[in-house]
């Protein structure tokens, strides 16, 4: 599997995700990560950055909540 494929699967999952998600909020990602996630959510991240973000999300799955909200806000 490639990072590109990982992110494709993630975005398909997030688009189908129900608004009600169980768990607790760990807060937003660090300030230096937010613009990178926002760029991905808006489709502005290049292939190299998408690969780096795929690895970052594997290391910090708690960032998925923020990314999911960012993608949903742009697709609404």
Image (cartoon, grey):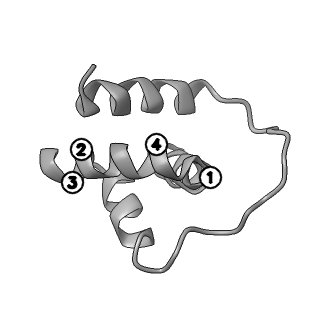
> Under tag 3, what secondary structure?
helix
Q: Residue at x 40, y 59 (%)?
A: 37
Is disc 3 in contact with disc 4, using a CB cutoff of under 8 Å?
Answer: no
Estimate the spatial distance between the alpha carbons at disc 4 and disc 2, rounded to whole Å: 11 Å
Residue 43 in percent (x, y) is at 27, 48
> Is label 3 or label 4 in front?
4
**Mark 3 neighbour density, 10 Å: few (under 14) some (14–19) many (20 or more):** some
Is disc 3 in contact with disc 1, using a CB cutoff of under 8 Å?
Answer: no
Question: Which residue is more in the foreground, 43 or 28?
Answer: 28
Where does label 3 land, which residue?
Answer: 49
> Under tag 2, what secondary structure?
helix
> Under tag 4, what secondary structure?
helix
The circle on residue 51 is 2
Counting residues from the start of the chain, the first of labels 4 and 2 encountered is 2
Residue 57 in percent (x, y) is at 45, 47
Is disc 4 in contact with disc 2, using a CB cutoff of under 8 Å?
Answer: no
Where does label 4 land, which residue?
Answer: 58
Question: Which residue is more in the foreground, 76 or 61?
Answer: 61
**Mark 2 neighbour density, 10 Å: few (under 14) some (14–19) many (20 or more):** some
Q: Quadrant of the N terminus?
A: top left
> Under tag 1, what secondary structure?
helix
Where does label 1 land, which residue?
Answer: 62
Q: Is residue 29 left or right of residue 32?
A: right
Question: Which residue is more in the foreground, 28 or 39?
Answer: 28
Residue extending farthest to the top is: 1
């Amino acid at each position: 599997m490639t990072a590109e494929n990982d992110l494709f699967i993630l975005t398909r999952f997030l688009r189908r995700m129900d608004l009600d998600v169980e768990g607790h909020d760990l807060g937003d990602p660090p300030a230096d990560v937010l613009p990178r996630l926002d760029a991905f959510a808006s489709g502005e991240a290049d292939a190299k950055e998408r690969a780096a973000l795929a690895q970052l999300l594997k290391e910090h799955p708690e960032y998925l909540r923020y990314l999911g909200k960012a993608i949903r806000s742009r697709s609404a």
